Amino acid sequence: MYCGDETGSFIGEIGSHTCRFGYGGEDNPKMVSPSYVVSSSSSKSSSSNQQQRYRRDDDDDDNNTTNNTFSVQPITNPNSFLRQGELVENWDNMETAWETSMHTLRVRDTLKHTKVGSQYNAATKRNEYIKYTELIMESLEASSVFLAPAPMLAAFSLGRQTALMVDIGAGGCCVTPIVDGLVLKNSQRRNGRGGDWLGDMTWKALQENKQSKSDKRNSNNNNNNNNDKKEGESLPSLSPSFPVIKPRYMLGKKVASSTNSIFQRRNINNNGITNVGGQGSIYHLPDGTPVDLASSFGRDLCQLPELLFAETTTLPFQHNNNPSSSVLQSTTLSNEPLHKLIHESLLSIGDVDARKELAQCICLVGGSSLLHNIETRLSQELSAILPSFVKPKVLVSRVSSVERSCASWIGASILTSLGSFQQLWLSKAEYEEYGTAMAIQRFP
Ligand SMILES: Nc1ncnc2c1ncn2[C@@H]1O[C@H](COP(=O)(O)OP(=O)(O)OP(=O)(O)O)[C@@H](O)[C@H]1O
């Protein structure tokens, strides 16, 4: 066994919203890019390779993104990689993402690197595990490969061997118990309420508000009443900055930037009631449109993250009682609120001591766990639902937002920098001798 310090690993984590790539042993991923492959409509003269343009993340300062090239043409054909964070929608896109990252970070110019992919539920979907291994070994010509479930790596990044990992990502929330470093697959629970869904709901709320405003204005005009604009409340206009098709990624970015400001105005008092702070505070949407958070619509908008904990998915201010968004309708995922999902997962664990231990170490990771005060809110809900002798403890990393949004990448980076990691990977020689069957045996 070779136990060198330098394993020369290249790590990729592909989520339904964001892909992260970089070298093992580093603190942050070198490249953070959206999970979309786009083709430009105006690139007829380009070669077919050039027509498949990979849009780079352009404004995510937190994640140490490199900003070299951008596709300036409108996005006409966004194809995502994963559906709901777990099912691979398009393996060609997956390969393009790896290829692009390796090309951008000049991986092929240096030594042959090991690739580490991390993926939800990969172990339960054997076919995907096999395909992923084949892709990395054959198409990307890796010298060795290691795949691991994202929650396990996230727990690793937090230095926890036993923890209930709650990943609130783009495609939904995933609750995974990790006991002594092992994933309890049968107790893993997942719902479809994530950042993308919140983005859809925000979009819907803004459009409903716009619609109701214009209806009101029309009726006022009909009555020859010129006072059609209420003071302190303004009409958000959403059209200008979106390209031909509104890609979910861009909406996600806008939601993230809005939620950073809007949801931080929320304060949770001791009774669990959310108040909007900063009376009369005006927030500007990314397109410059002002929304007064003290207005009734502003207050409603600040309540949107409550939907993660709501029994129904009706917007608090929705009048037509159309309960769920298209995202949830189109999936077979559970529609349970987050605290119930955690409760269900805990109940499915037979060992009472392990259950208690897990409840005392609930770790929040994922981009949407950056919602302000979400840990306090979750604690309150769990305290109400769990038996009194179980004291739930919800933990979040406060060092930086990257530690939460890139937790599994960071875990993989730590893992690959350990000397003993070389025992775990599947080498090219082993792959050639035993094939993908070895991957199923070897990877957690
Ligand atoms: N500061 C923030 N506040 C609220 N939401 C945020 C913030 N930053 C990012 N998000 C949301 O987090 C989501 C992305 O999270 P993450 O990068 O963990 O997803 P992913 O790993 O690509 O998806 P999945 O886990 O479903 O595979 C997006 O929906 C985005 O809107």
Image (tube, rainbow, N blue to C red):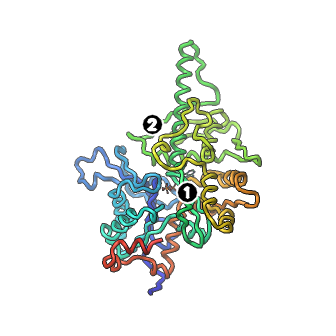
Find residue 386 and report its image quarter.
bottom right
The quadrant the N terminus occupies is bottom left
Closer to the eye: label 1 or 2: 1
Residue 102 placed where, x, y %?
36, 66
Tell me if residue 24 comes above or below residue 101 in the rendering. Answer: below
Q: Badge 2: few (under 14), some or many (20 or more) residues near its Cα, within 10 Å?
A: few
Whether residue 47 sits left or right of residue 417 in the image: it is: left
| Residue receiving disc 2 | 240
Name which residue type carries label 2: Pro
Let me know if residue 401 appears in the view: no
Across the whole image, how many numbered discs are drawn on residues?
Answer: 2
Task: Residue at 42% x, 76% y: name it.
Answer: 425
C-alpha span from label 1 to label 2? 39 Å
Whether residue 122 sits left or right of residue 349 in the image: it is: left
Let me know if residue 147 appears in the view: yes
Whether residue 360 sits left or right of residue 337 in the image: it is: right
Task: Residue at 52% x, 45% y: name it.
Answer: 197
| Residue receiving disc 1 | 189
